[in-house]
Each structure stands twice: as C-alpha cells, then as structure tokens.
Amino acid sequence: MIQDFADWLVYGLFGLSAETPLGVAVNFFFYDTIKILILLFFISALMGIINAYFPIERLRNYLVTHKMYGLQYVLASIFGAITPFCSCSSIPLFIGFVKGGIPLGVTFAFLITSPLVNEVAVAMFLGSFGLKVTLIYVISGILLGVIGGFVLGRMHLSSYLSDWVKQIQASSSAQAGEWEKDHTTFIKRLPVIVRDAWKIVSGVLIYILIGIGIGALMHGFVPEGFFEQYMSKDNWLAIPLSVILAVPMYANAAGIVPVIEVFVAKGIPMGTAIAFMMAVVGLSLPEATLLKKVMTWRLIAIFFGTVAFFIILSGYLFNFVL
Amino acid sequence: MEIKVLGPGCAKCKTTYNVIEKVIKENNLDVKLTKVDDIMEMVSYNIMMTPAVVVDEVVKMKGQVPTESDVKKLLGIG
C-alpha cells in the first residue's frame, strides 16, 4: 500500500523514471520515511501504554523485596528494553538502584539493555529489516544485558564506584520506597500517551530524514555488492573493527538504521551490521562522560570493554546463523 | 510557591524549564523557579526518571515534559 503510494507519487506525479538512479533514490526515500514514521508512532504508543502500568519504581521495589536466584538479571534487562531511554536519566536510575541495595550486576543489566533496545531502534529495525531480524535484535539485546550484567556482577566492582556513591551503597536499605499507586483510567491516560508518542516521532524526525536521505542516495547510486569485497563474512577482522569504530560515533538509531539497511543490501553481512548498530547506540562517549559522575574511569572502561566484547561475539554468532 | 526542575541538563529538562517559565511569566505569578542539576540534590528527592518537577518540596511529575496546561494545573490556575 505504502509502496503503491510512493510509486504513484514519484513515478506518476513527479514523473521520474523507475529506471534511473534518481527515481529509485527518491522512491526509496518516500517509501521508507512514511513506513517508518507510522511504525514509530504505533510502537512508541505501545511502549507508553506498557510504561504507564509498569513504572520503573515498581521494578525497583520488586527487585528489592524479592529473592530471585538469577532471574533478577532477566527482569532488569527486560525492563531496560521497555523503558524509554534518555541518556540523562541513566544517572538517577543508577543511583536509585544502588540506594535500594540492588546488586551492581543487576543494575548493569538494566543499563546495558536500556539504550540498546528502545522504541526508536525497534521501529527502525522493523521498517528496514522485517520482523525476523527485529526479533533477533531485541532478544539478543536483552540477552546481552543479562549476560553482561551477570559477568560484571561477578567482578566485584563496587570499589571502583565514585566515593559518594559508595557511601550511598553502604547506607542502602532494602526497604521499598513508597510508590504511589496511580488509579487513572486507561481512557484518561490515552491522550497523554498519544501525545508523548507524537513527541518521540517529532523529536527524531530530522534524524530519520537525514538517515533515509543518505540511505536513499546510496541505494540509488552505489552498485549492488559494492561492500562485499571489503567486508565479507570471511573477513574475521570486520566485526571487531566495526565495533571499535562505532563507540566514538554518537548517532541515534533513527539516523543510523536506514544507512545500515543499504549497507546490508549492498553486501555487508547482517551480523557485522547488527554488531555495528549495537555498538553505536549502546556504547557512546557522551554516556561515558555522564557515567563519570558515579563511576571511576576504570569502571567505565571495564563496563564498555565487557559490553563491546559481547557485542563482537554476537556479531560472529549472527553471521554464522543468519 | 517554589518550583524546582530536576535534571542533569538534557534537552527534555531544558524544555520543561522553559515551559514552566513561560507559564509563570504569562500569568504574572509569584513563583520562585530554579533549575537543579546537582545529582546529589536530585537523589535526595528519590526520583529515578528525569526531568522531574518539584512543587514546594513535593515531587509532582517525573520522566516527562509537561505541557502548558499540565503546568497550569500544578500551579492551581488551570
């Protein structure tokens, strides 16, 4: 349906030819933009609904008051996936967890998944790569948080926290903070949820347009299989290299996925592309500087190193499986 | 009345501050509005999501940017 509209608009109304690179590029641009905006709006609204019923305070109280024999990593990671991520919220969240006496590893599980799996990334993946790849991305993002958090939890890293955080940790109490129950009905909440979803869409719109614009140009003008010669599956160095390249790159999922989509279409293996994506959105230097307020550089390095290591591993795994 | 906007200085926190400032100015209200970007102070309010809006030391909103009508409600004029 959207494709029909894009065809009508570009080949009919604009009179561009489907045979020319320009026609292909413009068509790709309109088709992808419309599809992704619709998806993003609905997924944001869905996440908003889930969030209205499972606020983060509820997770914290649950983790503080229940013993779960390892399941807490899974829960924290899943919650990280459904909470809308804002890099500036990561510090208060971190402190909130530490204050409640929640183990550092569980906190890390949340911190790893939260930027990795978010409404924007899911919508972009769904629009660009389809359901199967999106599910793989989401599930591996959650697993990455679970495993990464567990491994980091085993390393006894408390001594590398900032001094004032250590004090908070020492005086942490396992009592659940008060969590005022909100009895607003669903119908009353809906306008706010829709409004917030719209805000998310309009907030990333410009990045989506830029990303799809670059993607469209490459789609029209770069020949098929162009990248294959540089980044084939047999090139074992490709994954670690693209992950390391990705860390200093700070882009949000909205801008980067349309470009990755074209990379894949032109011959880059899926696993390499996903690993690159994960490193771009999951590990960023601005986040590291924010974390400096609660951690020593050494702990940030260990944190990033561990996550990068597991992203590289999953890249190999995807290339092997997909 | 005293309002504090808690947030480490991200875009959402700035928007929140601006929305509240606008409502106060437009309605000529006698409200003391401050920005809190010190994490220690933020933590003392027990919030986990920013931006948060604190009215007379009570956390009224967290994790979202209020609209002008939300702010008017908080100020008791909406």
Image (cartoon, coloured by chain):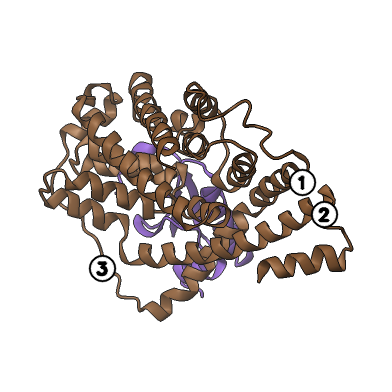
Chain colours: A brown, B purple
Q: Are marks 1 and 2 in contact (CB under 8 Å)?
A: yes
**CA distance for labels 2 and 3:** 55 Å
Sequence-wise first label, 2 or 3: 2
Image position of B27 with respect to B36: above or below: below
The residue that appears at 18% across and 50% down in the rendered structure is A63
Quadrant in which the N terminus of chain A is drawn: bottom right
Q: Chain of mark 3?
A: A
**Residue A25: where, in percent of width, then height?**
77, 50
Q: Amino acid at mark 1?
A: Gly
> Where residue A24 appears, x then y in whole percent?
78, 53
Residue at 33% over, 39% down? A144
Tag 3 secondary structure: loop
Judge by depth and name the residue closer to the eye, A206 or B59. Answer: A206
Secondary element under disc 2, as helix, strand or loop, is: helix
Report the quarter where the C terminus of chain A lies. Answer: top left
Disc with the residue nearer the chain's start (3 vs 1): 3
Can the viewer see residue A168 in this picture?
no
Answer with mark 1 or mark 2, whichever residue precedes in sequence.
2
Residue tagged by mark 2? A23
- Quick one: label 3, few (<14), some, or many (20+) residues within 10 Å? few
Instruction: Give the chain of mark 1.
Output: A
Foreground: disc 3 or disc 1: 1
Which residue is denoted by mark 3 in the rendering?
A181
For label 1, the residue is: A220
Name the residue at 55% across, 63% down: A39
